[in-house]
Image: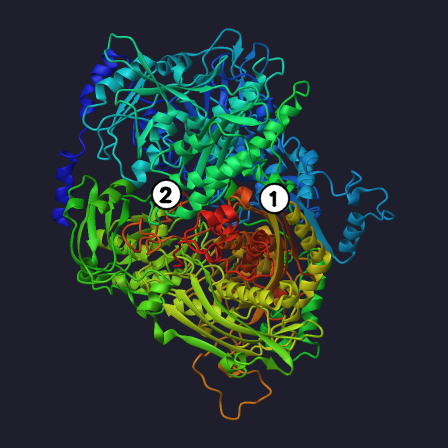
Amino acid sequence: MVASKAQAKKAVTLAYENEDVEKINVFVNQKGYRTTPIIYLNGEAIPTSLTSQARPNQTLLNFLRTVCGLTGTKLGCGEGGCGACTVLISKYSKYSKDAGIDESECNGGGGGGNGRIVHMTVNACLFPVLAADGCHVTTVEGVGSWRSKYEGLTCEGAETAACGGGCGEEKKEDYLHPVQRAMVDIHGSQCGFCTPGIIMALYGLFAPEGKLLESGQSRVEGVGGGPKVSHLEEHLDGNLCRCTGYRPIWDAAKSLCVDAFDDEGVRGPCGTPCRECPERDTCEMDCNVKDKTNVNAGICCSSSSDKIRDYQKVLQSKHSETWWNQPNDMFPKELIPHRKNNVVNGDSGIDSIHAQTQEQLKKPLMIADSSIHCGGTWFQPVCLEELLDLFREFANDSGGIKMVVGNTEVGIETKFKHAVYPRMIHPSESIHSLYDIFSTESNFHIGACSSLSMLQHKCHEFMTSSSSDPLSSQKTRTAKPMHDMLRWFASTQIRNVACLGGNLATASPISDMNPLMAAMGAILVLASRPSADGAIKRRHIPVSDFFVGYRKVEKLEHEVIERVDVPLVKPQFEYVAPFKQARRREDDISIVTSGMRMTVTPAEENWVISDISIAFGGMAPKTVLARSTMASICGKPFTADTFMHARTELQNEFRMPDDVPGGQAEYRLTLACSFLHKFFLHCLAKLQKDVGSNKKKRYPPIPTIDDDECSGADGFVSKQKPCISGEQKFPAPKVAVGLEATHLADDESKSSEIPLAAKAVAEAKNSEKNDSTAVGKPATHASGPLHCTGEAIYADDIPAPANLLHGSLILATKCNATMRKIDVSPALNIAGVVAAFTHEDIEKLGGDNRMGPILLDEFAFLPKGEVVEFVGQPIGIVIGESQEIAETGARSVLVEYVEKEGKAVVSIEDAIEAGSFWTDFRHEIKRGGDSKVALNQSQVDGKKLVVVEGSFRCGGQEHFYLEPNSTLAIPSESGTNLTIYASTQAPTKTQDFCARVTNTPAAKVVVRMKRMGGGFGGKETRSVFSSVAAAVAAKLSNRPVRLTLNRDTDMSITGGRHAFLGIYKAGALVDQMSGSVKLHALDVQIYNNGGCKFDLTGPVLDRALFHIDNCYYWPHFHAVGTPCKTSQPPHTAFRGFGGPQGMAIAEHIIDHVAAECRISGDRLRRENLYCTNDCTPFGMRFGSQYTGAWNVPLMWDRLYNELDIPKRRAAASEFNKKNKWVKRGVGFIPTKFGIAFTAKYMNQGGALVHLYTDGTVLVSHGGTEMGQGLHTKVCQVAAQAFGIPLEDVYVNDSSTDKVANTIPTAASMSCDLYGMATLDACRQILKRIQPIKDSMPPGTQLRDIAKKAFFERVDLSAHGFFSVDNDRCGYDWSKEAPEGYPRDLPENSWKGHPFNYFTQGVAFAEVEVDVLTGDHKTSRVDVLVDVGSSINPAIDIGQIEGAFVQGMGWCTIEEVVYADDDHVWIRPRAKVFTTGPGTYKIPAFNDVPETFNVAILENAENPFAVHSSKAVGEPPFFLGCSVFHAIKDAVAAARGDSNKYFELRMPATSERIRMACCDDIASSCMSGEPTSFQQKEAFE
């Protein structure tokens, strides 16, 4: 270590020297440059002592967090794909940005006018801090804060209030902005990590642009009156949320819109809300009858329109209008140029600071970094000559120079490709030719540096220009295709800073705008200045000729793209259309994108194609024109035949090999051909309109097509984005009695003549009568306000302790090879690197390098001589003075490998071929007779036996928790003690392995967990290795170490959901007379891909076996599960834990049987649902005394009848008959999910409760909060027990020194365990203080009782404990039936009772599929779930919605891709490709169901859990697969035979959907049999 420090110290004076530092004097003294940026933050100027630390290569996010200490802005992905880092940039500009007002209401803009304050949201993880020079930055901390005070306000009765509404209680007033308050009250946050970014995105959309007003007016005022709902729907596209399902966020956002009430409407079609109708008692309209029925049944019904309407009242009563102008009021006057008669925030004067600031901002800026971070040099010229001179001077110098505007591409290159740009130029807006957008008689001129948002806004202006403008038609026809494409280009945050010139210069082969520009005949203007005293030279080049190769363009090093000139489209008979298809509609790069332009000319008998241009992205290494195809069309008649022959030419021109980079060769070709067909249909419709508008002139006949073809003319690109809404129903709040009635009874109660349950019911009713209930209320999340203000602290937000070091893991770069040597010396030679540690250092500590939750088959750090088993396996850790330095050091470590013979096993098929299994953990379930024998018959009891066999595959899933794994390890007592702050679901497991590996007694290792930014199972075991690495580094260095994984690292090495393969043979008996079909026998083998280490693969597979029956009775059942070992990272727990995979296989088998038996899937499912007293194959019986009420049949019938599903299927079928290219589908499925850890010992939990003398209560328990509302529910249980307000109960954190030996927060068991444990502790305290209470007057407050108890030496603390009854958990797979086991008991019941009870549900979904592209949208979803008697219905509904959308994502767009035989273009083999939001797509705001209705079943008490509740976190996940089955239904309609079986694998990506449709276009693009086509894939 001494040598390491010496080397690092020496490097400080030798490395990272910036030669431009010597030029500073020249640029300052001779060229007038300044060297200090001017940045304002949350209304205040950032001191120069801090701004002087800003580096050219530093992002605004890094600066805010590390220099300014503001941690509300989060690092979620680092590539601008999740929006967690969103902040607001405000500046005075002549260019009015589209950043917060409705486009149709925006005035001014462009290069003219006096300018205004403009606001734009940006991704701080990409935005350079120095680009904020001259700007005001607003972070979530500057919007509002949770600093409460009591004002004596009473509840307004809003149903969204934390109390549930109408309680009349004294309420807290706060300092939250209306956006924050709405998000809190309407339950818009769960884990809260994404919430600050969403708050800022909404804040930016609501920010009015400020216009300087004349003297006499008091302040800067906004324009436009706030956004409309449609504006939010268009622009809320740059943020992701993994928890909520988005619906509550949409409701919160819409509740603040100026037209919210009008847009959402009211529930009564008469125009009056039903409950406010004066004819409420006599009205017979369906809406009123239904609502009265719900009220009479004790059902609370809350729709999106209800919330929005009610919240408008809250908004008016609690918030003044000054909030809305906050962005303008907070804008510093120093940043606004002073002009005569102008008033700046009420101040018409100008002081010296103002004048000095304005004078400085006129100067160009130069920052040359000389620190150890090697930040390079930043130039910000203020005129075009200065810009071109810099390019001339440095373009051919060492390292060159890079133009940076939005940094949306350069930021990706520097972070993920580790590109180094020694010099960067950021052109000032004062260079007008780079930013102006204007039109002339012949062209649309676009400044190359103008933001895409500005371009989109100007296009909208041109589209809505006055009809008196002679060029109005041409402007509209030119602007609309650009506007439509820009709507789907990246996100609002990206569009606000990205520019068209950068998009062109980057030359991405899958760019959205480049093909459109090429097709429209756009011309680039390139500027240069060959000599310092010479004129500016300009060169023109068509966009179609600009791209010369992969990421190569026809531009000289010293040239700059100054402008793009787009020719105006002719007023008639010339048509332009953009096309794109991506994995997800919003914020996703295209798979294939295209721009097409065509001119038709009337001839004597027909229309002739006189000109055509077709450009593609995604079909070649560059944007390319389809020249051969164009030649085959030009001059031909405008007919369907012409385009059909053109498709053949297009296929010949662009057919690609299977191993083409990016893959999807046949799908990409199919998309190109489909776009061409869409273009024909589009032009045909436009031609009809053009001809129809000029009836005086005679034209030749227009080609005709069948009516059903018309549906293919338009895709999502030109359509309005959806309006998301929903309805939530739940039973009226009540305090139900559950397991506590018997489980927590004391001896005195047990001996009483009054039944325990009756006493508990009486107590509950008494608390309801006294209005002292907390249980059953829809309280908001306890941390909701802190989430919304950015004040909630996560692991990476903990303030840096003194001498903090940052860590970065050393990761293996290949697998299936032996690590021969590791050399850390290159890292130690880097300035700022303090040390590097490997397995040898663990040995020096005397620690055990082995790890693993079940098997100790993992290494903390891979030892030399061992085989590298997955790409990214940790080899060691580098620690340094900053995270960037540590990462640079880790990448520099040299590792030598020796390749092993043979190829790495990647997929399940590879494992089966190689026999790579964990055979000791192969399990099976048998019930009934021999399934093979049962299936080898033709008839049974006179009924025909129909047998099917096949296979089904479902892919994996990335957890994509918004907060990456993060740990802060702090040593103390000379390194003998460790305190670990970790984002983990398993504090005890983290404690155990940190102690084990560092050779520290567990008693000296404390793990603390405040909250997680999502977990979903991914932080149950796979967070531990990173905490161990940090602990090792902290102990060895005796300094605090923070290790936060980058998103790409996290996704590369932590594993995810297991992929599954099911191979089955199944039979059903058909009653020829009645048509009834009964399931008879199932024989199924399932395999899961566990990755290279066992982790939790066995238990995951076991749960799949327990759920492969789903809700259906199979008399003869045989299932075998085999875990596969591959070269992928260890896969692990994920919401559902194997259950969804098992049920997905089950539902596929049901579909197959239904198709073969020619019966509807709905009927087959209903006729074969379990009935009460039926038994599962593993020996559990349904029924109240066994598993609680079996409600699935009841729920199925209820939803089936309420929705009139047969009518909906008939309507979809009728639609499908009339539309060839758009198909609708319906899906309807049930679920049951077993609740308990299948490992018996894990069904336990503890809690520690302290009652303080002021009457408040502190609860500590063994569970962890990851957004599921566990702490909130536990607080409700404690508040109910003590009879105190909910706000008087608090959970601080989860800590191993408070509650020891805890179980991971998983299996949806946490509320069951810790709610009961907390109640146990509360009752112990209540029993102790009962004598004190009895001695005091009735109604004495708890604080007075507690105070008296304290003085009487009564213990006011208690440790509670709960474990599930021994006979209600656990399962022994190997146990044989005991001799004499009663025959009347279920088969296999002797092995145990794996689940305490089942959470149940049903879901219905309707979708619409674009056959030509594979795109789909979910039109409607209805979900009904039995969650017992809900402790908190708001939280439970949030869990249902979030789980459903996550499940929907798993089965549709979330595809994990590995380098394998199907993806040979990825290197090395077994490397995961999908490592961030750029390549892996979770559902976004506009992907959720347009109508999203959720109901909780009433009268569904559960006697096996606290307060009769049920677990809710995981069970609804599988219901998202109703969307998959609806898609499958739509694809079946496209194939032409909805009753014919086909295998649609999961997930149903756009590729699978498109190719499964098997129409003529798709079939002609396939090399094999169209009906059996399967996407190239890696089911990991």
Local secondary structure at mark 2: loop
How far apart in space, not on screen, are marks 1 and 2 (Cα)?
29 Å
| In front of the other: 1116 or 208 | 1116
Picture coordinates of residue 676, whole percent (x, y): 49, 37
For this view, does 1103 lie left or right of residue 1329?
left
* Numbered tag placed on residue 185 in the rendering: 1
* Total labels drawn: 2
Specify the quadrant of the image occupied by residue 420: top left
Q: Is residue 259 above or below residue 1128?
A: above
| In front of the other: 1336 or 1357 | 1357
* Numbered tag placed on residue 310 in the rendering: none
Residue at 26% over, 36% down: 419
Amino acid residing under circle 2: Pro
Q: Can residue 742 be seen in this view?
A: yes
Mark 1 vs mark 2: give the one in front: 1
Q: In this view, does 527 lie above or below 99?
A: above
What crowding class fits label 1: few (fewer than 14 Cα within 10 Å), some (14-19), or many (20 or more)?
Answer: many
For this view, does 270 lie left or right of residue 1256?
right
